[in-house]
Image: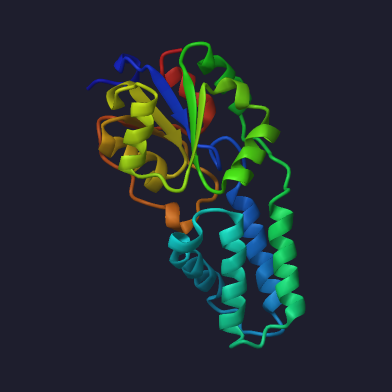
Amino acid sequence: MTGLRDANLRCIAFDADDTLWRNEEFYRGAHARFADLLADYAPLGGLRARLVAAETRNLGRYGFGIKGFTLSMIETAIEVTEGAVPASVISQIIDEGQEMLVHPVQLLPHVAEVLSALAAQYPLILITKGELLDQERKLAASGLGDHFRAVHIVSDKTEGVYARILSAEDVAPAEALMVGNSLRSDIVPMLEVGGWATHVPAALTWEYEQAEAPDHPRFTQVADLGALPALLGL
């Protein structure tokens, strides 16, 4: 079976959140603080599930990112308290979202050295979904921007989105590798468009992004990003 070493790659694409830098753990912390805020006003059983359901339901309205998450926290607070949530709690929820928008960027292990090594061998591109301003802020703060020949910040990751990006980069799908932590967003649609995909599992994964690992000849998985160069034969 042909492996990545024999793939004749002309481009490697990377996801950002929870592939290059920490992200989901900050949302989990916000979930916990959200529960604390509502402790005196609503039963907490199933609160996380209700907030995740609101986030998922609102993706078509707000898209991915902290602003949509903040609005979903407000909506959930109103729902679970049957409209009794005080304005002071709403204010604290807004403060929570604003704090998330300025949180320092923390790179994951091996990221800086792996990108540096791969950029010397391949053109690298970044494909990340979320809010434009927040993703631009995180990329600038990460210090990784110079490694990428192109950055694509998209509202979602689908087969059509990958096809459009690869066409714009003048790369055939069979010549491109996508590296990311989300099976649903980074891996499956890239395989569907005809590309290669390497999964780098994160310590925490949002329920929406979870999926079954595909049984596919162009799919690989590594324990962490540090193992990627060896997988490519470097």
Residue at the image point whose x is 41% and y is 21% from the top: 11
> Where 87 sits versus 138, above or below?
below
Q: Residue furthest front?
A: 168
**Is 189 left or right of 68, judged from the image as shown?**
left
Q: Position of residue 54 (x, y in %)?
A: 50, 69
The answer to whether residue 110 is seen in the rendering is: no
Residue at the image point whose x is 54% and y is 25% from the top: 226
Q: Position of residue 190 (x, y in %)?
A: 33, 36
Q: Residue furthest right?
A: 88
**Is 4 left or right of 111, judged from the image as shown?**
left
> Where 170 sits versus 142, above or below?
above
Residue at the image point whose x is 56% and y is 79% from the top: 45
> Where 77 sits versus 20, above or below?
below
The answer to whether residue 50 is seen in the rendering is: yes
Q: Position of residue 80 (x, y in %)?
A: 57, 82
| Nearer to the camera, 116 or 230 | 116
Q: Position of residue 38 (x, y in %)?
A: 68, 78
